[in-house]
Image: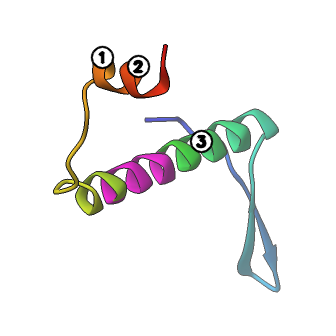
Amino acid sequence: MIELHPNILENNGVKQFAVLPYDEFIKINELLNDYQDLKDLRKAVTKEKDIPGISLSEAKKQLGI
């Protein structure tokens, strides 16, 4: 897990914002994108699990490679 170092900004004693160092923000963004990719992959695998496939050699034959 990533260690975060937020600066909490308050307005009239009420917490309003958390400000992160830029490198931590980038790392969180990358992790969220990776997680979204994983969710999309799992969804696609589930959706296409019953679709028949073809082998690589058959695909090459069909494409004339």
Residue beneath label 1, please?
57
Q: In the image, is 52 to the left or to the right of 18?
A: left
Which residue is farthest left?
50
Q: Is residue 56 above or below residue 40?
A: above
Pointers 1 and 3 in contact (C-beta within 8 Å): no
Q: Which-is-in-front pick, marks 3 and 2?
A: 2
Mark 1 nearby-residue class (10 Å; few <14, some 14–19, many ≥20): few
Residue drawn at the location 65% of the way across and 46% of the way down = 29
* x and y percentages locating residue 20 in the rendered image: 74, 48
The residue type indicated by label 1 comes to: Ser
Q: Which mark is residue 4?
A: 3
Pointers 2 and 1 in contact (C-beta within 8 Å): yes
Q: Secondary structure at mark 1?
A: helix
Mark 2 nearby-residue class (10 Å; few <14, some 14–19, many ≥20): few
Residue drawn at the location 28% of the way across and 51% of the way down = 45
Residue drawn at the location 28% of the way across and 62% of the way down = 47
- Magenta part of the chain: 35-43
The residue type indicated by label 2 comes to: Lys
Q: Earlier in the sequence, mark 3 or mark 2?
A: 3
The residue type indicated by label 3 comes to: Leu
Give 42 or 17, whichever is nearer the viewer: 42
- Give the quadrant of residue 58: top left
Residue drawn at the location 49% of the way across and 47% of the way down = 37
- CA gap between label 1 and label 3 equals 49 Å
- Give the quadrant of residue 54: top left
